[in-house]
Amino acid sequence: MRLLVSDAGNGTLTAYDARTLAPLASGDIPGAGALCAWRGAVLCADDADGCIRVLDADTLGTLRSIPAGPGVRALQPGMDGASLYALAGDADSLLKLDIAGNTLQMLARVGVQPRDLALDPSGRMLAVAGGASCCVHILRSDTLACAATIDVGGIAVGVCFGPGVLWALCAAGQEEMSSCLMRMRTGNWRIERTLHMEGMPGGLVGLPDEGVLIGLLDGVLYVAKHGKRAAWRIPLEGALPDMAARSGARVYWSDALGSRIWTVHSASAYARPCELPLEVEEPSGILLL
């Protein structure tokens, strides 16, 4: 397994052996950012060139580029294998791109500096954490038509789907010093449960047991699938875990406050977090292949 890390500070994308952390390949991408996998290739948002690069997964060499504009914060391939959804945070927009044709298919205005994007397991609906709109926006994946808008009462920073459930992470109110996790039933999109937490919100990742792991200032928090309370917290002093990549129960986190990558085993409350000895100046994307 390989761990890919975008570094906007150094303008590089590097692939490491996930077990030994030996560097396997590296490429110069001045605005390296959000990452995703697509049909054996790697897609990397390039903020400097305003495009999404299609890269050879082994060498990280650029095969071609898809125009997308700057400020792409999240990438999500469609279930049809031909479409790519790109969340353009600086433009308050969600783009639907034809990967093979290198063209923009459609665009929808969504949120204010939107932060995160998720595709439901059926591939029919998208959820967008709308940032300063203080809403989660639900859109149809085929037309990008808005199906629902959920007011979450604070800056929306993360979304992820579970079986029949949408999780949303947001700040509590306009300030980002405390957080809320909301559990919604898909279909009616009503908020079933809200969990209040101390700490600035970072990132959100779904787990195999249908619970979620939440990145907050100074730690990560585990919440089981019922969403009633936090089961346990692992401290990460001085860190704000924001972007995550998961393999089974092991989760890799980038740190929004420093040049660090952490790994946490989400199946145990007693597992110690591990800071990986990687030379990263400004982590801006993380992916496991």
Image (cartoon, grey):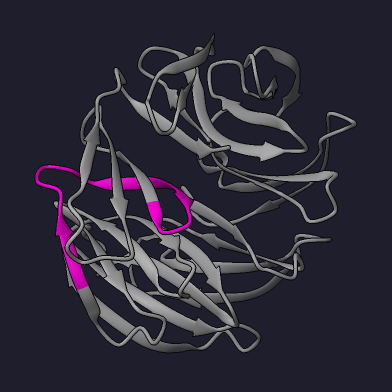
User: Is 244 contained in the magenta span?
Assistant: yes
Query: Would residue 275 be found to the left or right of residue 209 on screen?
Result: left
Q: Is residue 193 above or below residue 214?
A: below
Residue at the far left in the pictured view: 237
Residue at the far top in the pictured view: 28
Q: Is residue 277 above or below residue 154?
A: above
Task: Give me the residue at 31% from left, 75% from top.
Answer: 223
Task: Give me the residue at 76% from left, 52% from top.
Answer: 78
Q: Can residue 68 be seen in this snapshot? A: no
72 or 257: nearer the viewer = 257
Magenta-colored span? 232-250
Q: Is residue 46 above or below residue 118?
A: above
Q: Can residue 240 be seen in this snapshot? A: yes
Name the chief secondary structure element in magenta.
strand
Query: Would residue 121 be found to the left or right of residue 265 on screen?
Result: right
Percent position (x, y) of residue 200?
Answer: 20, 56
